[in-house]
């Protein structure tokens, strides 16, 4: 344990840089403990505040700019990848799209304080055409606020942090085990939350081929598009009704209770669509199914879309 803290004392800037970098790239490795510890060491005079802040901000900007460029090149596949590696629920995609559609680049200021938001917001910025200079400005300020608070807290509570580090050092290998157990519990709890969400949303899906066949045969189905306004710009399935983020919890389709309702989104595992489908079923609708693969699968199959 003493060796670990010796490393932090000797190579704190490098450890801080890589910790912030991998966290902002989407790995479940919290960087705030490192920010707090290096902030406490700064209080001892081992680091300067501007150097610590610059190190953290540069690392965050590199990771965020990578997602910004990736979304411009690879499109919605980037969002799917983000939600697969993230331990946050998949519904973060729609929530982030709604927030970014409303506030634009300004939403990057508090982004890093919201779990699961920062990487997706960076990717969205690349999609909607946010200028690079604007993105770097707002993302840099947001990163400075986020990192600065962690460093400040470490400096403010440096005595408490020192006492904690001393206790862990005295525990030796048991201190390392304690940290490992704490990290494992954190990751496991996030994984379990995500698993519970997926299990709660298990239900029958309809394939894009089935839906297209229904439309071709003139069968009546209520089709509901629950994507954000930004996502709806690529087009929608013919005859679909769009609903806003605020309508999700209260939406009731203008259709008989026994009529089939198809709900689709553009998020991994059809999470937003499944949430709305579950709500409609609780309200009495008997035939409600999310569209498997959502709008991306529909477009990939070559079926028609309305502007």
Image (cartoon, rainbow, N blue to C red):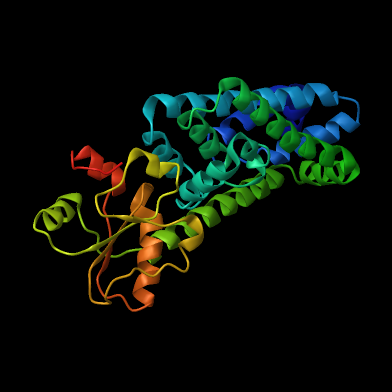
- When asked about the image quadrant of residue 285, the answer is bottom left
Among the 4 quarters of the image, the one containing residue 62 = top right
Q: Nearer the viewer, residue 307 or 40?
A: 307
Q: Quadrant of the N terminus?
A: top right
Residue 110 seen from this side: yes
Q: Quadrant of the C terminus?
A: top left
Q: Position of residue 290 (x, y in %)?
A: 29, 59
The one nearer the camera, 62 or 43, is 62
Q: Residue at x 23, y 68 (%)?
A: 260
Tell me the quarter of the picture where residue 63 sits: top right
Image coordinates of residue 174 in percent, x first then y, are 69, 47
Place of residue 164 in the rendered image (x, y in percent of width and height, measured from the top left): 82, 46
The residue drawn where x is 86% and y is 29% is 42
Residue 45 in the figure: left or right of residue 226? right
- Seen at 37% across and 68% down, the residue is 278
Q: Is residue 1 visible?
A: no
Residue 72, percent from left and from top = 43, 26
Q: Is residue 76 left or right of residue 166?
A: left
Between 95 and 257, the one lying in front of the other is: 257
**Is 68 on the left or on the right of 263, as rendered?**
right
């Amino acid at each position: 344990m003493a060796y670990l803290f010796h490393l932090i004392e000797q190579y704190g800037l490098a450890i801080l840089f890589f910790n912030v970098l991998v966290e902002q790239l989407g790995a479940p490795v919290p960087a705030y403990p490192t920010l707090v510890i290096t902030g406490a060491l700064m209080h001892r005079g081992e680091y300067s505040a501007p150097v610590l802040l610059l190190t953290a901000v540069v690392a965050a900007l590199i990771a965020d700019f990578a997602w910004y460029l990736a979304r411009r090149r690879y499109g919605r596949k980037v969002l799917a990848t983000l939600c697969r590696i993230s331990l946050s629920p998949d519904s973060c995609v729609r929530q982030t799209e709604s927030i970014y559609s409303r506030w634009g680049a300004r939403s990057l200021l508090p982004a890093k304080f919201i779990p699961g938001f920062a990487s997706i917001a960076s990717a969205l910025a690349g999609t909607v055409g946010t200028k690079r200079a604007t993105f770097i400005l707002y993302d840099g300020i947001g990163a400075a606020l986020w990192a600065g608070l962690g460093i400040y807290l470490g400096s403010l509570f440096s005595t408490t942090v020192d006492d904690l580090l001393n206790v862990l050092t005295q525990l030796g290998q048991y201190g390392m085990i304690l940290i490992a157990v704490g990290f494992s519990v954190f990751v496991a709890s996030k994984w379990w939350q995500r698993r519970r969400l997926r299990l709660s949303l298990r239900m029958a899906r309809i394939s894009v081929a089935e839906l297209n066949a229904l439309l071709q045969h003139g069968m009546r189905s209520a089709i509901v598009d629950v994507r954000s306004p930004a996502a709806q710009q690529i087009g929608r399935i013919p005859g679909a009704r769009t609903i806003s983020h605020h309508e999700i919890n209260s939406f009731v389709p203008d259709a008989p209770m026994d009529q089939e309702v198809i709900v689709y989104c553009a998020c991994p595992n059809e999470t937003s669509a499944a949430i709305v489908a579950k709500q409609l079923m609780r309200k009495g609708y008997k035939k409600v199914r999310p569209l498997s693969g959502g709008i991306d699968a529909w477009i990939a199959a070559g079926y028609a879309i309305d502007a």
